[in-house]
Amino acid sequence: MDLIEAMNIVKTFKNKSVKETLKDLERLEKTISFSNFENIFFAAKIIKDASSQIDEIVHASGIMIAKEVWLNENEEVQYLSLYSYGKFFYVVCF
């Protein structure tokens, strides 16, 4: 299974809301087979693996774009450290 197929499987399962999908499944009393759930699980795992550390990638690339605004013409970044504390990311430039 490739990433595109995995995304389609998860999108179909999720529909509008995973919470609503699970409520519907409770009412339908196990109409989805074990193999379908196994397929959904593996699809979700593929997506999770592909998106690991995506927050760090977004923040780091955003910083590299923003540094053009932050720095004066004669300044340069000699060291960049990106770390998080809870939901907040901090940038330390030297």
Image (cartoon, grey):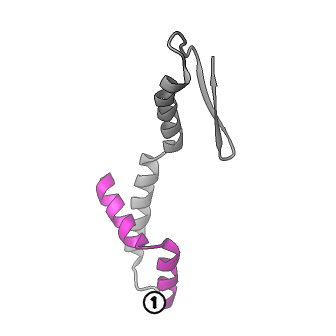
Secondary structure character of the magenta stretch overall:
helix
Residue 49: % across, % down: 45, 48
Residue 90 appears in which quarter of the rendering?
top right
| Rendered-image quadrant of the N terminus | bottom left
> Within the magenta stretch, is there residue 77?
no
Closer to the camera in the image, 38 or 90: 90
Residue 41: % across, % down: 44, 64
Closer to the camera in the image, 41 or 84: 84
Residue drawn 53% across and 75% down? 19
Residue drawn 45% across and 85% down? 30
Above or below, 21 against 40 in this view is below
SS for tag 1? helix
Q: Is residue 1 visible?
A: no
Residue at the farthest top position: 74
Residue 60: % across, % down: 51, 33
> Within the magenta stretch, is there residue 12?
yes
Image position of 9 (left or right of 93): left
Residue 31: % across, % down: 41, 86
Residue at the farthest right position: 85
Residue 39 appears in which quarter of the rendering?
bottom left
Q: Is residue 64 visible?
A: yes
| Rendered-image quadrant of the C terminus | top right
- Amino acid type shown at disc 1: Leu
Which residue range is magenta in the image? 1-29
Above or below, 40 against 66 in this view is below
Above or below, 4 against 89 in this view is below
Image position of 91 (left or right of 67): right
Q: Which residue is mark 1?
A: 28
